[in-house]
Amino acid sequence: MKADKFPVGAFVDEQVQSFTSKQIQLQKNDLVYLFSDGFADQFGGDKGKKFKYKTT
């Protein structure tokens, strides 16, 4: 599925952007995987800083 390319809560050209509504038909035993590549760039936690990734 093609994604909408703007962050949650974003304003582009001072207009609220709307996400595209999508529906899929699931069958018994289907698996659904949800993921985001933006978690590490979010601000939060005790210090309100970016989460970032830890190096291993």
Image (tube, rainbow, N blue to C red):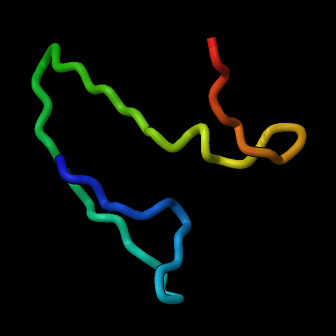
Indicate the quadrant where residue 54 lies: top right
Residue 46 image position (x, y, % from top left): 88, 38
User: Residue at horizontal 36%, vertical 32%?
Assistant: 34
Is 28 or 10 nearer to us in this picture? 10
Is 37 or 33 nearer to us in this picture? 37
Residue 4 image position (x, y, % from top left): 31, 60
Is residue 8 toward the left or the right of residue 28 in the image?
A: right
User: Residue at horizontal 80%, vertical 45%?
Assistant: 49
Residue 32 image position (x, y, % from top left): 27, 26
Quarter occupied by the C terminus: top right
Residue at the extreme right of the image, as rendered:
47
Is 54 or 12 nearer to us in this picture? 54
User: Residue at horizontal 42%, vertical 76%?
Assistant: 17
Is residue 37 toward the left or the right of residue 4 in the image?
A: right
**Residue 13 vertical placement versus 30 (above, below):** below
Is residue 6 toward the left or the right of residue 4 in the image?
A: right
User: Residue at horizontal 56%, vertical 39%?
Assistant: 39
Is 44 or 40 nearer to us in this picture? 40
Is residue 40 toward the left or the right of residue 3 in the image?
A: right
Residue 53 image position (x, y, % from top left): 63, 28
